[in-house]
Image (cartoon, rainbow, N blue to C red):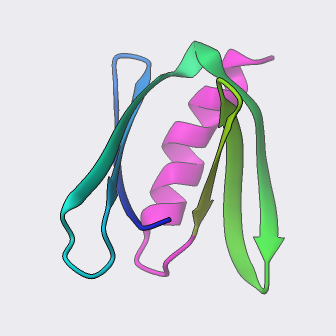
């Protein structure tokens, strides 16, 4: 759990998890889109939530209200879903 910074490069999702207090890096994940499964959009207590699985590890992104969800939904999630059709 923490603040997440992510980017999409060459069919890979790069996820950097930062500590909430110090904003220091805790973990980095390199997730090839072809290895992501079970992508979905849901609601969580009125907030938008995106979930997916990578190698049995579940990732959950909850919209923070600063536009990241819209970018993630529009660009990244569409690539993930397209990869699995």
Q: Is residue 80 left or right of residue 8?
A: right
Relative to 25, say whether 68 is above or below: below
Q: Is residue 67 left or right of residue 34?
A: left
Q: Position of residue 8 (x, y in %)?
A: 37, 33
Q: In percent of the image, x 69 and y 71: which residue is there?
A: 48
> For residue 56, what is the image quadrant?
top right
Observer-nearest residue: 69 or 31?
A: 31
Q: Position of residue 65 (x, y in %)?
A: 49, 81
Q: Position of residue 72 (x, y in %)?
A: 51, 51
> For residue 21, what is the image quadrant?
bottom left
Relative to 46, say whether 73 is above or below: above
Q: Position of residue 23 (x, y in %)?
A: 21, 71
Image quadrant in which the C terminus is located:
top right
What stretch of residues is rendered in magenta? 63-85
> For residue 37, what is the image quadrant?
top right
Q: In percent of the image, x 55 and y 48: which residue is there?
A: 74
Q: In percent of the image, x 18 and y 64: which residue is there?
A: 24
Q: In percent of the image, x 65 and y 23: which residue is there?
A: 55
Is 66 inside the magenta-drawn segment?
yes
**Number of marks in picture:** 0
Main secondary structure found in the magenta portion: helix
Relative to 36, say whether 18 is above or below: below
Is 67 inside the magenta-drawn segment?
yes
């Amino acid at each position: 759990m923490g603040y997440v910074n992510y980017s999409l490069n060459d069919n890979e999702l790069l996820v950097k998890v930062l500590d909430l207090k110090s904003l220091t890096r805790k973990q980095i994940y390199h997730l090839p889109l072809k290895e992501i499964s079970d992508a979905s959009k849901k609601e969580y207590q009125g907030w938008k939530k995106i979930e997916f699985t990578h190698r049995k590890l579940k990732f959950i992104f909850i919209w923070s209200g600063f536009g990241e969800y819209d970018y993630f939904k529009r660009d990244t999630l569409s690539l993930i879903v397209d990869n699995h059709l």
